[in-house]
Amino acid sequence: MLASLVRNTTALILIASLIFPVTSIAKQQFREDTSAQTATGKLKAGSHVKVYLPNLPYIASSHSINGALFRPANNELGWEYDMAVSHEIINPTLYEFTLRQGVRFQDGTPFDADAVLLNMEYFVKEPYTFTKLHRILTKVEKVSQHKVRFHLSEDYGLLLYDAIWLQFYTEAYLKKHGWNGKPFCPNLAEAGPYGLGPYILKEGYIEGNRRSDVAVLERNPYYWDPDAAKVEKFTLYMGMTQQEAKDKALHAEGDIDITPVLFSDELEAIFAPYSKTSRLQSTNTYIARFNLFTGNPIFQEREVREIINNLIDQNSLVSLSMNGEGRPTYASIPEQFYGMSEALEQIEAHQPSSTESNQEAMRERLNEYKVQYGYQETQKIPLRFLAQESMRYMLNDIKFYLEKFDFDVQLIIADSESAMFASAIGARSQSNDIDFDLVLWPNFDWLRNPWVSFFIFDTSSVWSTTEPEQNLDKLINDFIATPYNSEVYIERLRDLLTHIRHMNYQLSLPSPFNIIALNKEIIFQPRTSAVFPLWEVQVSDYHWSVRKEPAYPEELKVPIKVMTSGEE
């Protein structure tokens, strides 16, 4: 892994020396990052950080505003305790959680077992629907003032990951908005002291299907850990363009402090006067699934879908579409999730030594299907590919691979994310407004569990990719029923992965690196997932919000070596 990192960093410098004038880059010196030298790990009075959140802002900000039993973490299991301090899996249908004591909501009211029961009462009325918890939760029991039990109607292994998103709100919020569940992860419908997180949403609103362009967060004085919040105020921007955010972060101070940047903008971010760059292997992926409800009937054939997958070279996509900033996957699921490396080792051990595809044999087989579905052998099969404009860089390369063979690819660019998802979900009920055969979207990790990619294969869900299918349904239900610590967890994960890959319900695409530009005086290690833990952000004494001198020192504008973190 280190060798790969060295090669990529060296490549960046070599490319930079070719693109930019020799005097400015080839002789450019890098300095060490000194921002942490004045970090105290405590709140800095007057500190203010501005963050651009173009992707799933309701997920990115949620745990900075709200509290749940668990919260996402960069560890093997993907979670750590939040409002819980311990748990016990009594059996796969009974889970017990011990709550953190002395916790208050942002309005000062107490959080205890009664608050959990009240929230779960509202949750059942308006749940999120990306897991089956709402269908199998039979009872939440108060054992004591700081201990609760969740009773389930069937074996269930995902509850600890559900616990990341079972957020708790004040009674005032619940009476006004309910639990407000949707197909998406939750957040707040309006500003106010309604949550348990280290920051209070003071202005704006952030939900899966609606958000304000700007939101303001301020430190929660009642948070159980008084040292958690190290920045006094955050402003979150969700309405500007990626280009605008990049320009504000790289070439000015006081406008944007943290922003994702495109692969093509990485070099500019490295050498800009006010930014530094974090580069890490993410747990995000891309989902490109076939429309098996209202799409072209020929794609109902597993072998046709397999041919399409075999035509796409993931390594070339990484090199060309992603500027080398990614890694191939087995079935569009990152290897970093718990149990994945063991499952993939078992799959690899049973694979044939050679998996190369014979293009002539594929063409002959495809011609047979053409005749079966009313095409001439000389005709190309039309394939309508739905996505957003932001994915065009990958769409164009996929289109190139498929059109070299026997497909005629039409790119359909949705006007908005909501329009794309409305048709992607609507196809299941024959209510899609846009006709398509494949739909592609960036799948940002919100769960730190393979379910973040498997949820589209739950045929009972609105997100389902296919009609109920006996083998798939059994494998999905077996996986859902199995806790991570079960001796059969790896086996069930392996079998589900193998089936999904064999059926080719979706394209197997690479997992991208996260490229984040940060103000040079920000101390923060971004996550591999979609979550931005704002309580971990600090500023140095030279940050614009606390610096006494008006101008940023010239000597600090020297480029900083690329920060690398996460699993590479």
Image (spheres, grey):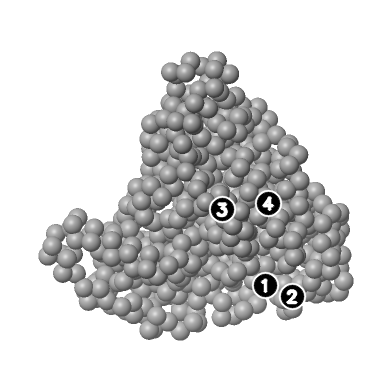
Q: x, y percentage for residue 149?
A: 83, 66
Name the residue that disc number 2 marks.
86
Taking the image as shown, residue 489 lies to the left or right of residue 19, namely right
- Please, what secondary structure does the residue beneath circle 1 have? strand
Q: Position of residue 428 (x, y in %)?
A: 66, 32
Question: Which residue lies at the image location 54% right of the left edge and 57% below the top edge?
Answer: 334
Q: CA distance from mark 1 to mark 3?
A: 25 Å
| Disc nearest the viewer among 1 and 3 | 3
* Amino acid found under the numbered disc labelled 2: Ser
The tag earlier along the polypeptide, 3 or 4, is 3
**Quadrant of the image containing the N terminus:** bottom left
> Sequence-wise, which precedes: disc 4 or disc 2?
2
Q: Please report whichever mark, 1 or 4, sits nearer to the chain's N-terminal start.
A: 1
The three-letter amino acid code for the residue at tag 4 is: Asp
Q: Secondary structure at mark 3?
A: loop
Q: Above or below — where is 236 with respect to 436?
A: below
Name the element at disc 4. Answer: helix
Judging depth in this view, the residue of 565 and 275 nearest the camera is 565
Cα–Cα gap, marks 3 and 4 = 14 Å
Residue picked out by circle 4: 495
Q: Amino acid at mark 3?
A: Ile
